[in-house]
Image (cartoon, rainbow, N blue to C red):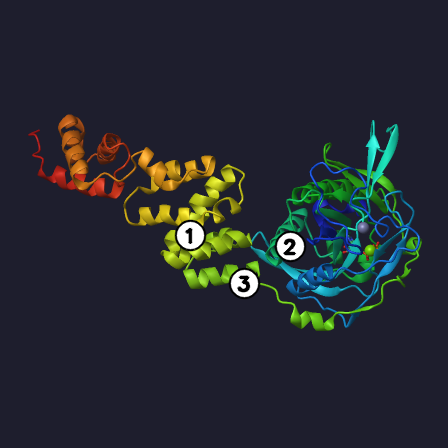
Amino acid sequence: MTASALAQDDLAAVIGLEVHIQLETDTKIFCGCSTTAEADESPNSRTCPVCLGLPGALPVINEEAVRAAVKVGKALSAEIPEQTQFHRKNYYYPDLPKNFQITQYDAPICADGYLEIDVADRSREITVRRAHLEEDPGSLQHEGGNIETADYTLVNYNRAGTPLMEIVTEPDFRSPQETRAFLNKLEEVLEYLGVFDATRDGSLRIDANISIVPENEFEQDETIPDDVLAAANRTEVKNISSHKGAEQALAYEVTRQKNAVRRDRTIEQETRHWDEARGITVSMRSKEEEKDYRYFPEADLPPLAVRDWQSEIEIPELPAARRERFQREYHLDAESAAKLTSRKAVADFYETVADQFDPGFAATWVADTLLGELNYRDLSVDAIASRRDDFLSVIELVDAGEITAKNAEEVVLREMLDTGADPTRVIEKNDLGTADTDEVAAAVDSVIAENEDAVEDYHAGEDGALNFLIGQVMQKTGGSADPDIVNQQLREALSWVAHSPP
Ligand code: ADP
Ligand code: ZN
Ligand code: MG
């Protein structure tokens, strides 16, 4: 059967990712220069002979970076070898001051781990082939245009030597959606470990390898024979910097490659560039091969014995385990448990609230109300975590029936977040104390007196009449009454009102 005889549906996408993440350390991976960019720092100000690659300068490994890498390895259930080794990867490019990059080759710090993802009610295990440490190059700044049209190009080595970890998966993904699920999951884990800051500019860079394979080449267990994978021409899409970008770039490539196969065109084995603005991938160059890099051991860094670190370095409870525990321990449904555990700071915050209140009540307040208000303002949970006691005092008042949930959210919480106001002041200023029983009773009486028609409708069994009357009472009490109490008092009062004869 020729490729063109295959319907588009008989072709499957095969995808593998190489994810570069910036490890959160104070200093660069082989020198003492800071990793934190100052607001208006000048180019090449955060540099020294080591990260500038000056002759004779010697690298020293940053222990913090190695520890972070071991944490990632443990979280991925990877093997940490007895010894790990650094290599030089040789290539010439102006952002690389030594003309080689210090990276890892055949003895990476982590090998053979995995991460489980859930897509469309299916759980799949994605194998992480390896994860290694390396240094980031500097950055180029094209003046007056892009790489092809610029008048001249400047180079800034402030980024050079920033610690990166490259996480390489097996070609286990079968759809762009799966890669997005993986990246989300990975980011959750990294955030829990405290080794990664997603908000840092350029902290995530993704290369995606993709090929198209006829579905009849798949084995029964849905794996694909190695020789088929090796024979498939693939493209490597570079320059992806977000989860959404990965999904979009790959969706584009899947269509492009499937169309090529259907038209009997060969897919060039090449590196392509993801043009985010145009939403397309464009050919960059033919792919380098490993031999082009002339890897050899970095003699300035001795092999590092890391096996013992594995047991010594501890990692926190990870998102999946915490999700499960939240469901078990606090009887939350899967959706709330997922919402509350996707960020560690949110999960920690929830647990302090659940310690003091009913866990279900706490979940409603944190997962629905608070996260909703924070998302709307593009704020992180840090905005409230530092004011935990204020938040607790607000829901305490709701719990005690002293202010309504509606007022607590729409007036107090919102003002706290918008202006930083103190909740007690907001409550006083807006006179939000719940209406007392007498006030509600008076409002109920006058609403009944003023709305004869609705009262009649109520007795005639008309749906909606009661809600209308409740609304009237709420209005009279300025929203400060508890709707449940109004409901109850109103029905009681109505039962005493005589029916007018028909
Ligand atoms: P290279 O030597 O070209 O860098 P590797 O074997 O190191 O290739 O794999 C690099 C990435 O390419 C990995 O993420 C891997 O999963 C992926 N990959 C390998 N074969 C395929 C394929 N047939 N289709 C898609 N991705 C693939
Ligand atoms: Zn330096
Ligand atoms: Mg490779």
Q: How crowded is mark 1: few (under 14 residues within 10 Å), some or many (20 or more)?
A: many
Q: How crowded is mark 3: few (under 14 residues within 10 Å), some or many (20 or more)?
A: few
Label 3, label 2: how far apart the Cα atoms are = 14 Å
Q: Which residue does the image show at 51% across and 37% down from the upper left? A: 377
Residue holding disc 2: 186
Q: Which residue does the image show at 41% across and 46% down from the upper left? A: 390
If you read the primary sequence from the N terminus, does the residue marked by circle 1 or circle 2 appear first? 2
Q: Residue 158 is drawn in which quadrant?
A: top right
* 78 in relation to 55, above or below: below
Label 1, label 2: how far apart the Cα atoms are = 25 Å
Q: Which residue does the image show at 79% across and 49% down from the upper left? A: 136
Residue holding disc 3: 321
Left or right of residue 315, residue 56 in this image: right
Q: Which amino acid does label 3 sit on?
A: Ala
* 60 in relation to 137, above or below: below
Proximity of marks 3 and 2: CB atoms separated by less than 8 Å = no
Q: What residue type is labelled 1?
A: Ala
- SS assignment at label 1: helix
If you read the primary sequence from the N terminus, does the residue marked by circle 3 or circle 1 appear first? 3
Residue holding disc 1: 363
Q: How crowded is mark 2: few (under 14 residues within 10 Å), some or many (20 or more)?
A: some
* 113 in relation to 287, above or below: below
Queried on whether the Cβ of the residue with tag 3 lies below 8 angstroms from ligand 1, the answer reads no
- SS assignment at label 2: helix
Towards the viewer: 259 or 317: 317
